[in-house]
Image (cartoon, coloured by chain):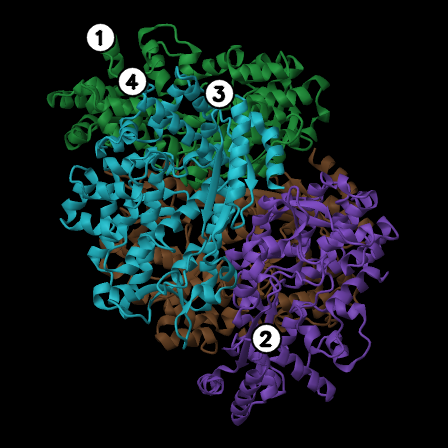
Chain colours: A green, B cyan, C purple, D brown
Amino acid sequence: MILRDPVHGLVEFEGDAERVVSALIDTREVQRLRRVRQLGLTSLVFPGAEHSRFAHALGTAHVMSRLQARLRGQQSVLPSELRLDDEMERDALAAAMLHDLGHGPFSHLFEEVLPHARPHEEWTVAMLLDDATEVHRALARLDGGMPERVASLIRGDHPVKWLASAVSGVLDVDRCDYLLRDSHATGVEYGIFDLDWLLRALVFAELPLDGPAGDRWVLAIEGRKGLPPIEGFFLARHFMYGQVYHHKATRAAECSVRSIFRRVAELVRDGRAPEAVPDALRAAVLGDPLSLEDYLELDDAMLQHALGRWSRDRDPLLADLAGRLRSRVLPKTVPLPDEPGSEQGWSRAVERAGAIVRARGMRPDLFVSLDVATDVPYEEPPEDPRAGLHVMLRHQPLRRLGDISFPLQRLRNQAIVRARLCFPAEVRDEVRRAIEEVLA
Amino acid sequence: MILRDPVHGLVEFEGDAERVVSALIDTREVQRLRRVRQLGLTSLVFPGAEHSRFAHALGTAHVMSRLQARLRGQQSVLPSELRLDDEMERDALAAAMLHDLGHGPFSHLFEEVLPHARPHEEWTVAMLLDDATEVHRALARLDGGMPERVASLIRGDHPVKWLASAVSGVLDVDRCDYLLRDSHATGVEYGIFDLDWLLRALVFAELPLDGPAGDRWVLAIEGRKGLPPIEGFFLARHFMYGQVYHHKATRAAECSVRSIFRRVAELVRDGRAPEAVPDALRAAVLGDPLSLEDYLELDDAMLQHALGRWSRDRDPLLADLAGRLRSRVLPKTVPLPDEPGSEQGWSRAVERAGAIVRARGMRPDLFVSLDVATDVPYEEPPEDPRAGLHVMLRHQPLRRLGDISFPLQRLRNQAIVRARLCFPAEVRDEVRRAIEEVLA
Amino acid sequence: MILRDPVHGLVEFEGDAERVVSALIDTREVQRLRRVRQLGLTSLVFPGAEHSRFAHALGTAHVMSRLQARLRGQQSVLPSELRLDDEMERDALAAAMLHDLGHGPFSHLFEEVLPHARPHEEWTVAMLLDDATEVHRALARLDGGMPERVASLIRGDHPVKWLASAVSGVLDVDRCDYLLRDSHATGVEYGIFDLDWLLRALVFAELPLDGPAGDRWVLAIEGRKGLPPIEGFFLARHFMYGQVYHHKATRAAECSVRSIFRRVAELVRDGRAPEAVPDALRAAVLGDPLSLEDYLELDDAMLQHALGRWSRDRDPLLADLAGRLRSRVLPKTVPLPDEPGSEQGWSRAVERAGAIVRARGMRPDLFVSLDVATDVPYEEPPEDPRAGLHVMLRHQPLRRLGDISFPLQRLRNQAIVRARLCFPAEVRDEVRRAIEEVLA
Amino acid sequence: MILRDPVHGLVEFEGDAERVVSALIDTREVQRLRRVRQLGLTSLVFPGAEHSRFAHALGTAHVMSRLQARLRGQQSVLPSELRLDDEMERDALAAAMLHDLGHGPFSHLFEEVLPHARPHEEWTVAMLLDDATEVHRALARLDGGMPERVASLIRGDHPVKWLASAVSGVLDVDRCDYLLRDSHATGVEYGIFDLDWLLRALVFAELPLDGPAGDRWVLAIEGRKGLPPIEGFFLARHFMYGQVYHHKATRAAECSVRSIFRRVAELVRDGRAPEAVPDALRAAVLGDPLSLEDYLELDDAMLQHALGRWSRDRDPLLADLAGRLRSRVLPKTVPLPDEPGSEQGWSRAVERAGAIVRARGMRPDLFVSLDVATDVPYEEPPEDPRAGLHVMLRHQPLRRLGDISFPLQRLRNQAIVRARLCFPAEVRDEVRRAIEEVLA
């Protein structure tokens, strides 16, 4: 199989292990990812950000394939049971391709709002293990134990820790692909790092710890010359959070969707369900058992369709909320202080803004919200000697990345917090003035 | 207004005339373009081709803005009534941005199949002129005559022909943007040409013809040094047709959609309409009046949603057809001879394949189709001295581009024809053998 | 060995055969290429064109390495004696890297002007075969027969014709690299084609001709889908000639250098040799035997140094000529008609311009020249059925590329001719007027 | 004037003020920059790094032109005497283009080694002010006061401080161009930052300090959204130092050149001067007055020519040293500890290595050297409130960049030190062992 990809150019899956990609690509569950945008509502702000999770799934498998090509030449230092063999290569390619299978539309909003929704990671594993799915069958056809092994790579409880971390960890093939892809699609160049050198900078190293070999051996960085691509990677991540993932207008749109879901939930519970409510949403509202079948029906198309209907619903509140989003009338935002201990100020701000919208006849719980976005650009907690990345310097003991990298030393374990108040455009001036008083 | 665009980088609409872009961007009709993919089903083949007509609309306005910046320094040779002034600049920016407003989902398939559907160009004009649309109101608010003037630029009957041709002609801002954008999104590099130099290569020239000044003055190419960017433009167009727009798998998917629409139409006419048929589709089937309101509801989301329902419809034929597309089980194709006079062979091939599928219990009219894709990379018909492009050489009379460009001389007026037979994968070998006999 | 290259990105020579690159890179003859600019005087016009033949030599070896990787999967159809084995791979890598070894500074000017100069191709072979060179010794150390085999690949008389053609032919690794590299360095994007797909489009095919197998088997293009990258390649070549290699100002600078060499030759012959004349130049003027040692001393640095001296020479004519070039006072040019049969007009133009400069006291033979640049973008002479490229279509006999490619059909065997008259800026208006009369 | 540039694309100098670029470009002093490579010996390590200071001079003028276009829309807040007018624009473009005029070949090596050499900055100013130079005359022809004003912008003592800082400061047009250009040429992508957004992020701000207005007003960063491009700029600088400018092999080659200069100096002083010693070098050795005329003769070509001669000199020591460099036999290096207080260890290492080479009959002062490279990626000394950059946040006092940027907070004022020992390859193992003992 050979594909053109806007990010990686010519993408070939032609090796033996890579046949798993062809076996999976046309399954119903993988094809569903074509109908789920990678960045949810972000295209409201960056018009180019219309790419789907499907393209990302293929890109992630491609990065895994390149990583394996690099590591085949490096793994002679490993105990034999930790080395890549045909089976492990195939498992890891499948895990890379399927790691986001359970994602619903509009990213995490769905599971945040609905009390009985399961997190998307659980859905991913469920799809792998449920023998009714085409993905499960495609894997089991290759090898009966494969669904479980792939699931364990994705869950992170696989005995070969370094491989599970390459699927999902601080430096994994998922992040490698999405930073490049989101950067390419949005036109925000900060997400570009040097993948070629990054792959070449990786070697195997053994941590001086107790425990099974599978836990001790990790992917590490080779020498000081390996630092720039790794630093570039984490800085790219940091910039993309600041510029794209935490962009105020995207976050405002997400607040808007949360309010819509909340109102729909109320109406469903009150027996006044609007048209076009997806079965999965109804079940998640009512706490009914939610079948995989129903969950798989959920995609951007279905929600966009529903939003269209809701914008003309007979419930005026729902129609108002959905109509605003549909015409891109997004909430306005003001930044709130983000120092530790600001929480009290946040509450006061929410209260004041709530009072203002209430005076205009709007419900504070649906029209005012506090949005707190956080990110830790590079995690390397001091109490966990396995966490983060390590660097191999000639004739020296293994060092932690944050100890020897200038740009990362300050960013390490730093939680970047961006707090904002969201409220309707029509009360903008009033709220701004009130907030200035509150925060003065 | 300032935007990031993956194709053009930083896109600014900050001049006086460009305020029209801000006035239009959040209208309901323009926002609908976010839900219509530029390349319809192409992402089934090129996973990156998921960009919408919305991003293209902005990109086209941007190219128009750059073209105007170039021409302001060139237009002193023009009669004053043909020069860009503030009004004309604003009209042209609006026309560039709105030129595709009437496009429905899945590109032209809808209007090809349904007997009573109007072509998308008519819908575009209808949306501009109907005072119920937000686009109409936004334009009329700026200037009462604007909707009509913009429509006339798009229809091509504007008195300033050079400007109408820049909106829609052999070398227009629409093509400039979509070649670059589709190339970027698919990862097919052949669509890239040098926009910077192309814009610099343009000057005004007067054709030695009778008629009003508005007809005589055209945009022409300056000197031999202007040839490469123009040749590059038409070659890019040629390559993109061969590689992307006429790709066999995309065309096969389109055959598949046509069959689905045909089956839905039958069921509607028979009073057995499936679930989730959009009102616009029903009206187009039955010849009922189709309101603009209903047409505007049509988008990719609605059709994707309907396809999902139809794949589980109680009509087994519709369920089969829709299920195949949804799981990307596309028809197979074989190329047919494309010399002039091959039509008879095509008919025989369709007949033979029809017999084969009929023997398997499938309806030939839904499972076999002849697909003929054609394109003329560069049109410059000898009988129309105004058509095509002209080149200004120092001290020489104006020359036609096709007369002095080596690569275009052969391509000029050449209809590239690609004929293929489409049929289900399960009869692949049988059909191939039969076709070889027929064509031997 | 791993390198960063601005054109190809990360360039690795790490396979077994590729060790030959490391063995050759630090030889004196290869290092000399660092001091010879790839595009001679072109940087006077495109300031970025300052790259050396050294970077091109490495890039060419890299393209050969990629070509070999592609062909290893394709060569099972070949008779065994025509297949790549370790020896042949190594030979071909060396040939790719060394193909331009004999180039002197300022490209071909040197050999054009000096009556006794040998063409650079002969110098390349001489360096390979002379056991005093480091290159010869490095090759012979690997295998005694290697210098001769590499020379035969470069000369084109190697028994494995397809491989010799890949080193030097219509579609060879040399052109692949220089089009991309020159395009990158000049900023002229027309030289970019899709190398990834081009390599994938190549297969082996057998011509239906008599003769030894080595002559019959060729690299051909696979299917219609292979056409675009090949067409893109030849169009890129066509554009680069028009835009860069035949740019009027570069050609004018070359006229200028020719005059300088002619004047130096006169002075040398008259026993009034200026300072800093390189030994090789002196020998080439006088017809003395020219040692390889002396030839190897020639590089851009030496000629730039000499030009600096000559611009202050006691011979006022040489000082004038060299001073003009050094301060970038280039000759002016006017285009002359380029239809077949224009030669007589050219002569008249040269004569008239000559009379004008003579009247100003300048020597016509040094200050006026006719410059005729020619190129055949794609050669496929009808009388030689082996020439050009062939295309393999399923179930059809091998076709010639020019027969089935629209853009190449017209360009095939077409000699593009650009004729210009060069003369000093100070007589510009006078010459222009005279030429207009002559050509009227 | 319009040019193609590999970094900036289409570069136009077509405004009124920009005519100064055309007036300067063909002067002898600017043309000399074509013969001086921007990165000296770096192409020995990165083969693509062959670009000259000439291309950089034009690129720098282009960035200045873009900066001015941005600032014309921002400067209404400035006191009128600090605003850009035609004269100031022209002066600043000239200063940008000429800022490196005095650079000799091989970057700073020349002035480091020769006791009587003047720093290149002084030569730049000398060339501007000496009325014998073509640059001086071209400037004076436009306006008699221009040479002095341009010199004062370059020296930094111009009354409009913000403009002088834009010519030469922490964030200046010189760095903007060279980071992008060196990155492009070497293929090291870390030097790429987002110039478009960086220019848009700049505004004028007034520091709350005493002193003349010219000192108080600075270019500052607008809002948090302006941080990423600025952070990207300084991180790019940091990475380019680590990857390219301080690359161990480049530094080793520079050690090699220093030894050659030292040996030539000894021979000159001893009256045994080798052939081809440039007059400027001889004067710098002997402390003789060095004329501008002689200095202008110095370029890469002259030194390359001299190195060629010296590699065959009758002095065996010089021939050895020059021959090594010419065949790219570079010194080897070992890293030394770089903590503060390591100086003593460095001395011991030099001593031990010196003893080893002396035992082999080589002179320690010519064959062993300590190389200490340092860089401060972002300078913002606490004691100087004017230094570094400032950020304007709405409703807040001006903040220092280092106080609010996560990635720069740690890098600010941090001197990165890289210490290495350089020595001949033939004693590699011996020296490595000795150093390990010394440093243990």
Cβ–Cβ under 8 Å for marks 1 and 4: no
Q: Residues within 10 Å of mark 1 (few under 14, many from 20)?
A: few
SS at mark 4 in the image: loop
Looking at this view, is D390 or B342 the one in front? B342
A434 vs C235, left or right, is: left
Which amino acid type is marked by label 1?
Asp
Image coordinates of residue C410 in percent, x first then y, are 56, 61
Q: Which residue is mark 3?
A: A28
Q: Nearer the viewer, mark 1 or mark 3?
A: 3
> Furthest residue to the top?
A288
Q: Quadrant of residue D431?
A: top right
Between circles 2 and 4, the one closer to the viewer is 4
> Which residue lies under the disc numbered 4?
A276
Task: Give the quadrant of residue D396.
Answer: top left
Q: Which residue is mark 1?
A: A270
Disc assigned to residue C372: 2
How far apart are the alpha carbons under marks 4 and 3? 22 Å
Q: Are marks 1 and 3 on the same chain?
A: yes
Front residue (pair D14, D203): D14
Can residue A156 be seen here? Answer: no
Q: Chain of mark 2?
A: C
Mark 2 to mark 3: distance in Å?
Answer: 64 Å
Which residue is painted at 24% across and 35% down in the image? B28
Identify the element where label 2 is drawn.
strand
> Closer to the observer: label 2 or label 3?
3
| Mark with earlier residue (1, 4) | 1
